[in-house]
Image (cartoon, rainbow, N blue to C red):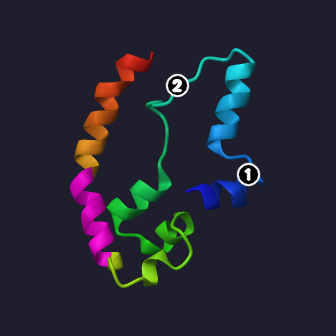
Amino acid sequence: MLAAEREIAGGLIHNTADKILAQQGNRLDPFPRQARYPLSQALEDGDLKSARAFLPEGFADQPLLTPAELVELARAISPKVKQLTEDMRPMVQ
């Protein structure tokens, strides 16, 4: 994720953007409902080509977890992660 942010935003990662917004006094919403998570969506869709852009270089080629297993894992944990995000949303607003 950080590699993709650095590539797309020229080094400005989300942590840096959060600090800038906080210093300016703007309200931050760490779990916006309209947020899109391209890696999660790509894995849920089984779209490994799109997912590779958000994974560390060579990740899909390492022997510990095959791309198919990564997709299966993402699909298995996705509902729980979404539920935890919804549960946390009221705590940060």
- Residue of label 1: 9
Q: Residue at x 37, y 63 (%)?
A: 43
Q: Tell me residue 48's x, y (percent).
A: 43, 73
- The residue located at (36%, 85%) in the rendering is 63
Q: Main secondary structure of the magenta part?
A: helix
Q: Residues within 10 Å of mark 2 (few under 14, many from 20)?
A: few
Q: Residue at x 38, y 24 (%)?
A: 89
Q: Position of residue 54 (x, y in %)?
A: 53, 63
Please give left or right for residue 1 compared with residue 20 in the image: left
Mark 1 or 2, nearer chain start: 1
At label 1, the amino acid type is Ala
Answer above or below: position of 27 versus 35. Answer: above
Query: Which span is picked out in magenta?
Result: 68-77
**Residue at the disc numbered 2:** 29
x then y, percent, for residue 70: 32, 69
User: Which quadrant of the view contains residue 26?
Assistant: top right
Above or below, 67 against 9 in this view is below
Residue 26, label in figure: none
Residue sitting at x 45%, y 15%: 93
